Each structure stands twice: as C-alpha cells, then as structure tokens.
Amino acid sequence: MVLPVTLDGEAQAAVDAAQAAAGSRPLAVPTLDSVYGVPASWRRWNRSAAWRRPRRWRLSDAPQTGSGYGRRMLGRAWGIGRSLIMYHGQPGKHRRMVRFYREFLGPGDVGFDLGAHVGSRVRAWRRLGVRVVAVEPQPDCLRILRLFFGRDDDVRIVAGAVGARAGRARLGISTATPTVSSMSPGWTESVASDRSFARVRWDRSIEVDVSTLNDLIAVHGVPAFCKIDVEGFEVDVLTGLTHPLRALSFEYLPPAHDSALTALGLVERLGAAVGGYRYNYAPIETMRFASDRWLDAAALGQLLERFRPLGRSGDVYARLARPEGAAMSTSESWQAPRGDDVVSGGARGDPPAELPGEGPRPVNVGLLQRSARPGDEPADRPTGAGTG
C-alpha cells in the first residue's frame, strides 16, 4: 500500500508544472534508484519519505504475471472457498452423508472417489472406516485434499483423471465454479446452453495424466463402492472398466440426459454376466433415494424422465442384484487377507431386489417436490453439477 505524502511548496510547484506539461496525465513519482537527474527538491523529498516507500517486489511486479493475474488468483480462492463452505461447513449434511453411505461401505472396505473435489465424501467414508482412493485432477483441489488427508495412511490421493485409456488429456477448468471443471468439450457445449449454466465460464485449461479404472483396481484392489462424478466424462470412465463392481454411482444432469443413458447402458452390460444391476436415484445433495425400491434399468429411465423437467442434477446408484458375482482381488498397496480387512462390500441390509416383470416401484413424491425448490441446490454451483 502506498501512503499519501505532503510535499513542500517547491516540490508541489514542480509536480504541478510537470502535470501541466503532461496534459494532466498521472505523473510517476521517481524512486531512489532513479533519483539522479531530477531537481534537488525532489531528491530531498525522496530522502525524507524513503522510509514510507513500499517494498520493491510486489505481486504485480513479478515478471511472470499479467494484467489479470491478481484477479485470477482471487477468483480461484473464491471458488475453492465457496466449495469448502458448502461441502465441509454444514455438519448436518456430513451426518446425513455418513448414514447414507453406510448402506454401501463399512470398516475395511475400499472406496474409489473419482472426482474427489475438496473431499466431502472422503471425510464421510473415513468416518465409516473405509480406505479411500481419492482421484482428482484439479491442482487447487489437490492442495486441499493433501492438507486434509495427506497424513492419513488410509487415504490414497491420486493426482490425475480417469478415462477410457491411459495417457494425457486436457481439463477445462471453471475458476469460479470448480465443481463443473470437465474433460469433455462436448459436455461443456451441451450444458452451456442451459440457463442454469449461463454464468459458468471454463476460462483456462491444463493437461493432466489419465489412467483407467482397471489400472486403479490393479493397484488398489476392487472397491466395494465407486463414486464417479467427472462432469460429462462418465462414459469414458466406464469404458475403461471391464468387470462389474459391487456398487457404484454416476452423476445425472438433465441437460446431458442422453449421455447419462449411455452410461447406464455400459453399467447394464458390465452386470449382465453376473445377474445384473438394480438402480436408484438421489436428487442433488439430499442423500435420500427417490424410489422406495431398487429398480431395473427401464424403470430407472422412467424415473429420470420425471425428474428431467425440473432441471436438477443428482446421482444414479447401481448395485449388483447378486453381490457375490463381483470379481474379487486383494490390493497391492493394502494387502488384506485378514479378518475385516478383506476387500468386501456391497449394500448392507439391502431390501429384496425387484423381481423381473414387477414394473416401476413407488416414487418418493415428497422428495420429487422438494427437488424442485431452488434452495436445495448448493449455492456454489449451477443447477446440479459436481459433488465435493
């Protein structure tokens, strides 16, 4: 911060004359380094006021910065700060999340959090005693994850993304709303036309490492549950998986309805050889299922059609009708041949799966109505996008 100074009469007259000669343009006040060659009165003024001069190196003086650097840094801090408040600043939401995921995960299980963002799921799963693999490509989110969980031996933080094949890919980042950063240009184009995304800008991009779900399983073992929240990249993630998991979830966004149906088809094919999957849907961050019973793929499609006009996102949950059909393996990092450490899981205390031909199950009408209320949507993201 530059402090105001009071000039003596001679110095002020010199400043006034110089400004008049420059056409009243702002006059750069000389520094001690360039004082030679200016009037003696200016040298005396500089010497007397030198102690009030700001430090030579400021953020705006750094050679690598541009005119908008400070604004971009502020925007990044603002976006991450809002995410932290929304996903870690509500104790009630955290407690609901712990209760909700207890149906899928328990002590000793391995959980994959693909698109971990700022780690709200990691935090809830660790409360359940789950060993977590948190995958996140955004550098700012990775800093938060390492700050919160970097010393936890039961959390593996993987810097990168998951896709159809290993390699490198570009991630489009939304500085103000990092929950909607995406690796799918087609997805960003499709949702940009939705009015809830009217203010979203993907203003920069970075190149990130990409692995496949099969690669992660080879290193960390088969997860009891896998959360896939990758903003339009769900189909690519599922393409890189060649055997069924006990349970998983993927995001549903009404503007990308067709993409969600494609992902649903991939999950169906994965489970076809082991008895198939049953599905449910949880709107936005309610941590409550929309249907009282688990549904087949056709019934889930009908359920999503009922929520689609509301324009609200949510998550599709899938679990094997016969969990014993899931492939099992031990982890190379977490060797688990003993007791509760065996990689196991699936839904606990599950009600009977829907029988073939029974048709759609009842829908939670109250939840359907509540999901239409704008106040239910986290304030740090557009209508439905990403989780923390």
Image: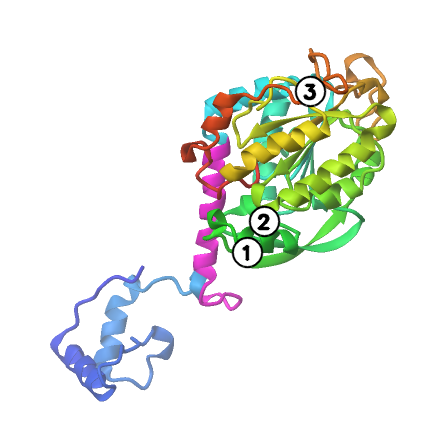
| Pick the front one: 9 or 214 | 214
Q: CA distance from mark 2 to mark 1?
A: 7 Å
Q: Position of residue 272 (x, y in %)?
A: 84, 29
Name the main secondary structure of what is drawn in magenta. Answer: helix
Quadrant into which the C terminus falls: top right
Q: Amino acid at mark 3?
A: Leu
Q: Nearer the viewer, residue 24 or 304?
A: 304
* Circle 2 crowding by C-alpha within 10 Å: few under 14, some 14–19, many from 20: many
x then y, percent, for residue 374: 42, 35
Q: Work out whether residue 75 or residue 231 is closer to the camera in this orientation and state it.
A: 231
Q: Is residue 302 above or below residue 129?
A: below
Under circle 3, the secondary element is loop
Q: Residue furthest left?
A: 9
Secondary structure of the residue carrying numbered label 2: loop
Does 314 sit above or below residue 170?
Answer: above
Q: Is residue 47 left or right of residue 200?
A: left
Q: Quadrant of residue 261?
A: top right
| Horizontal side of residue 50 vs 208, given as left or right | left
Q: Which residue is mark 1?
A: 202
Residue pointed to by mark 2: 181
Give the residue type that dot 2 points to.
Ser
Quadrant where the N terminus lies?
Answer: bottom left
Q: Which numbered disc, 2 or 1, marks the residue that appears first in the sequence?
A: 2
Q: Which residues are magenta?
A: 61-87
Q: Position of residue 239 (x, y in %)?
A: 79, 43
**Measuring 49% from the left and 39% from the top, which residue is drawn there?**
83
Residue, disc 3: 105
Q: Earlier in the sequence, mark 3 or mark 1?
A: 3
